[in-house]
Amino acid sequence: MEKRDYLLREIEKFSLLLQALLNRLEGRRDNPTLSVETDASEAEEELFRESGFELGGFLRMDGESSRDYLARFEGLNPANLELLAEVLTALGTPLKTENNRICLAKALDVLELCKSRDRTFSMDRELKIAEIRNALGG
């Protein structure tokens, strides 16, 4: 019972953290004076401080290493993986630099991982995957 409670708290913590980051990033899209680099830096700091998740390192990992890294975090259930992908998509949009491209590619990887782990088909997730692939030109 104690292990289950801990897991539920971790899932909730990740959910709240990722939702707060996403809300902040989406609010900044309306302010062109704020740069993607600033957004990424702040998101990276907050994720690490609150959960130990190292965004910069995660963005540099290959596919296999990324999946292994994500598996270490008990709070990353399919819903939270989708939120992480949304944060990465927000950091990667608009597609202007190589860093933006990396964020979008990683968001696609996370959604594909979520798709493989989740037993429930999600049309919304499929649309997000298609949109990211389209943005990346493939």
Image (cartoon, rainbow, N blue to C red):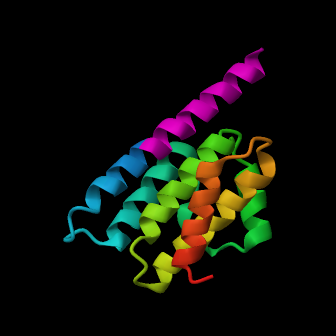
Q: How many marks?
A: 0
**Residue 96 seen by the camera:** yes
Region rendered in magenta: 1-19
Picture layout, residue 134 above or below residue 108: below
Residue located at (19% from left, 71% from top): 33
Question: In the picture, which quadrant includes the C terminus?
Answer: bottom right
Residue located at (76% from left, 50% from top): 71
Query: In the orientation shown, which residue stands out farthest toward the top?
Result: 1
Residue 114 image offset from top left, x and y in percent? 71, 52
Q: In the shown orientation, is residue 116 left or right of residue 27?
A: right
Q: In the shown orientation, is residue 79 left or right of residue 70?
A: left
Closer to us: 29 or 35:
29
Q: Is residue 126 magenta?
A: no
**Residue 102 seen by the camera:** no
Q: In the shown orientation, is residue 33 left or right of residue 55?
A: left
Q: Main secondary structure of the magenta part?
A: helix
Closer to us: 86 or 1:
86
Residue 105 image offset from top left, x and y in percent? 60, 73
Question: In the picture, which quadrant includes the N terminus?
Answer: top right
Picture layout, residue 20 above or below residue 56: above
Picture layout, residue 5 above or below residue 66: above
Dividing the picture into quarters, in which one does residue 96 lie? bottom left
Residue 101 image offset from top left, x and y in percent? 52, 79
Closer to us: 87 or 13:
87
Dividing the picture into quarters, in which one does residue 37 lie? bottom left
